[in-house]
């Protein structure tokens, strides 16, 4: 079975490299660091590469050991975490491709099984929850440090245990980790609610711009590069904006666009019945049923028109 094959691949590897998806969130970062620490504990020569590490997660154990450049040209084993396809994988992708064995561990419905070994569970609420289950199956010691990283992934990808992908296992894991001494309340605050002034100003600006379309079933807002410059923030400071739009009564789809080098990145959320991953797949993106994204290589006006037009088709 795949889980046993992955364990053998780990056992047989000396040099291991860990990748996550670009613009990494708490699940990508937490999963990567948990895996990194576990591999170190096994005595492996392991590196984790995250070229743009988000400030918010500096509190995580071993975050200071994350590499922005790799030291080897070829690894025995490359592991991609929380990443649906090669396009989304962070750089340097060629090092991932060159590795002797490639493993893909993920929970996105749109995962395209790009590894030699793929362990993908689309009903798991976080990649970190999958990794927790794996580590238990492998009987790895889940130290307080590893648990801190894993619960950060779970907390952030479940919006603080509130999304409907949460299972009874999620709470069992949280309970076990609390008993290990993990400070869940602090992690919750540090990763979800304790925001910088710049992040707050971005939310304020985006909230002011919210438009209600299709009888209030769609909300739309945006942030440009100029806004980010003015507020001295970057893309990592924009999380939370799209959720604001979704929280309004009567809204089914929340759309948030933010400017990137080649156009606009779209972040979509839904409340009840729309599969936003299907909408984003139309634009070569993907994600989960109720949270997905894609890149729109157009001007703001055209990007808005195209994504709104497709979203409308999914409304009842
Ligand atoms: P967010 O809106 O928070 O950036 O992303 C929501 C979800 O959609 C995340 O699980 C993220 O990994 C996924 N996602 C965002 N953008 C893309 C994209 O361009 N392609 C794919 N395949 N997934 C995406
Ligand atoms: Mn995730």
Image (spheres, rainbow, N blue to C red):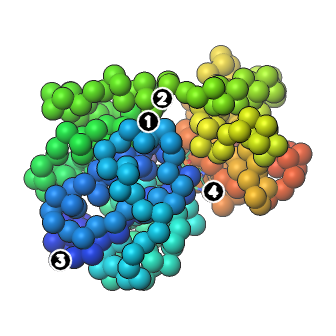
Contact between marks 2 and 1 (CB within 8 A): the answer is yes
Give the x, y percent position of residue 40: 21, 61
Q: Earlier in the sequence, mark 3 or mark 2?
A: 3
**How dense is the environment of label 3, judged by Cα within 10 Å: few (below 14), some, or many (20 and up)?**
few
Could you tell me which residue is drawn at 43 percent across and 29 percent down?
190
At mark 1, the secondary structure is helix
**Residue that label 1 marks:** 156
Contact between marks 1 and 3 (CB within 8 A): the answer is no
Q: Nearer the viewer, residue 161 or 18?
A: 18
Q: How many marks?
A: 4
Q: Nearer the viewer, residue 210 or 63?
A: 63
**Residue that label 2 marks:** 192
Could you tell me which residue is drawn at 64 percent across and 37 percent down?
238
At mark 4, the secondary structure is loop
Could you tell me which residue is drawn at 51 percent across and 73 percent down?
93
Q: Is residue 201 visible?
A: yes
Q: Earlier in the sequence, mark 1 or mark 3?
A: 3
Could you tell me which residue is drawn at 43 percent across and 54 percent down?
82
Q: Is residue 177 left or right of residue 72?
A: left
Point out the frontmost of discs 2 and 1. Answer: 2
Give the x, y percent position of residue 77: 31, 75
Q: CA distance from mark 4 to mark 3?
A: 35 Å
Contact between marks 4 and 1 (CB within 8 A): the answer is no
Q: Quadrant of residue 285?
A: bottom right
Q: CA distance from mark 4 to mark 1?
A: 21 Å
Q: CA distance from mark 2 to mark 4?
A: 25 Å
Disc on res. 76: none
**Residue that label 4 marks:** 285
Give the x, y percent position of residue 139: 10, 53
Q: Is residue 94 left or right of residue 309?
A: left
Disc on res. 12: 3
**How dense is the environment of label 2, judged by Cα within 10 Å: few (below 14), some, or many (20 and up)?**
some
């Amino acid at each position: 079975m795949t889980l046993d094959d992955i364990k053998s691949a780990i056992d047989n590897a000396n040099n291991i490299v860990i990748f996550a998806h670009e613009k990494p969130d708490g699940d990508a970062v937490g999963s990567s660091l948990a895996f990194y620490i576990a591999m170190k504990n096994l005595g492996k020569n392991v590196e984790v590469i995250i070229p743009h590490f988000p400030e918010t997660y500096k509190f995580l154990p071993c975050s200071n050991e994350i590499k922005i450049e790799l030291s080897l040209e070829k690894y025995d084993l490359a592991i991609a975490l929380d990443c649906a396809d090669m396009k989304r994988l962070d750089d340097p992708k060629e090092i991932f491709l060159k590795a002797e064995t490639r493993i893909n561990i993920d929970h996105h419905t749109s995962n395209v099984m790009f590894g030699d070994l793929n362990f993908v569970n689309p009903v798991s609420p976080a990649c970190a929850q999958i990794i927790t289950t794996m580590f238990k199956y492998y009987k790895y010691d889940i130290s307080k440090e590893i648990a801190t990283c894993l619960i950060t992934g779970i907390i952030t990808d479940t919006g603080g245990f509130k999304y409907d992908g949460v299972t009874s296992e999620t709470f069992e894991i949280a309970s076990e980790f609390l008993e290990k001494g993990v400070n869940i309340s602090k992690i919750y605050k540090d990763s979800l609610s304790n925001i910088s002034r710049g992040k707050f100003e971005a939310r304020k600006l985006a909230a002011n711009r919210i438009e209600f379309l299709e009888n209030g079933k769609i909300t739309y807002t945006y942030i440009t590069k100029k806004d980010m410059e003015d507020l001295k923030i970057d893309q990592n400071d924009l999380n939370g904006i799209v959720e604001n739009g979704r929280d309004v009564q009567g809204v089914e789809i929340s759309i948030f666009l933010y400017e990137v080098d080649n156009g606009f990145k779209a972040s979509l959320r839904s409340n009840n019945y729309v599969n936003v991953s299907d909408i984003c797949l139309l634009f070569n993106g993907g994600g989960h049923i109720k949270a997905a994204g894609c890149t729109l290589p157009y001007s703001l006006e055209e990007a808005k028109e195209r994504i709104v037009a497709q979203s409308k088709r999914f409304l009842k």
